């Protein structure tokens, strides 16, 4: 399995499978690197498959909670969490080794940045068009945090989907 930092020169795309589904594939050229499934109804959350040897799950304990937890599928204890600020423009991802990443959402979710704790942009997600089902993923610089936690891309996608659903 290749590290995400090796895709710096290659464009990555998040593509929604169909108009009415909530399944996304991460493409590097024509190769599928990983998949994300946004769950609806009783089990709100998301599942990530294919990026690592383990499957990852995003979930909220309570519907009023500002915290989204990340755990391995089938396990009870989360290993990372995301806490949004009150205005919902930025949020912090607290990783297992004590480091943190900052996710910053642009206006109308056209561009979403993932920064390290020093403020350097690691990753950028850009919507291809207003009615497009594709998001372009641009890796700005090499980062060990991104290589160790490739599910961060899908966490940002999960947050973008939640923000869009809240606006309707």
Image (tube, rainbow, N blue to C red):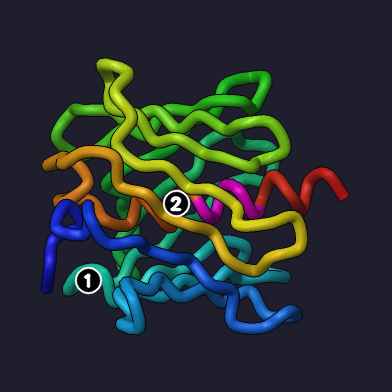
Quarter holding the N terminus is: bottom left
Q: Which residues are magenta?
A: 157-161
Residue 139 falls left or right of residue 68:
left
Q: Residue at x 41, y 75 (%)?
A: 35
Viewer-closest of 98 and 122: 122
Give the x, y percent position of residue 159: 57, 47
Viewer-closest of 152 and 72: 152
Question: Residue 155: which numbered mark, if any?
Answer: 2
Q: Nearer the viewer, mark 2 or mark 1?
A: 2
Residue 143 falls left or right of residue 42:
left
Q: Which residue is mark 1?
A: 54
From this viewpoint, is residue 120 visible?
Answer: yes
Q: How far apart are labels 2 and 1 at the CA level?
A: 15 Å
Give the x, y percent position of residue 93: 37, 34
| Rendered image quadrant of residue 26 | bottom left
Give the x, y percent position of residue 43: 61, 68
From this viewpoint, is residue 74 visible?
Answer: no
Q: Residue furthest front?
A: 9
**Residue 113 falls within the magenta-colored stretch:** no
Q: Residue at x 64, y 55 (%)?
A: 161
Q: Earlier in the sequence, mark 2 or mark 1?
A: 1
Q: Is residue 122 above or below residue 131?
A: above
Classify mark 1: helix, strand or loop. loop
Question: Residue 164: which numbered mark, if any?
Answer: none
| Rendered image quadrant of residue 75 | bottom left
Classify mark 2: helix, strand or loop. helix
Q: Is residue 116 above or below residue 145?
A: above
Q: Residues within 10 Å of mark 1 (few under 14, many from 20)?
A: few
Viewer-closest of 153 and 45: 153
């Amino acid at each position: 399995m290749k590290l995400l930092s090796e895709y710096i020169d290659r464009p990555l795309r998040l593509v929604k499978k169909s108009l009415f589904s909530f399944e996304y594939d991460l493409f590097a050229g024509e190769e599928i690197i990983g998949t994300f499934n946004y769950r609806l109804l009783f089990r709100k959350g998301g599942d990530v498959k294919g990026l690592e040897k383990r499957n990852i799950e995003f979930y909220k304990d309570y519907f009023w909670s500002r915290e989204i937890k990340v755990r391995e599928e089938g396990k009870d204890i989360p290993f990372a969490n995301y806490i949004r600020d009150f205005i919902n423009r930025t949020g912090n991802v607290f990783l297992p080794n004590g480091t943190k990443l900052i996710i910053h959402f642009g206006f109308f979710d056209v561009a979403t940045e993932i920064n390290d704790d020093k403020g350097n942009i690691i990753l950028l997600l850009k919507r291809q068009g207003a009615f497009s089902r594709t998001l372009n993923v641009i890796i700005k610089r090499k980062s060990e945090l991104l290589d160790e936690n490739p599910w961060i891309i899908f966490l940002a996608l999960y947050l973008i989907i939640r923000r869009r659903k809240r606006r309707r």
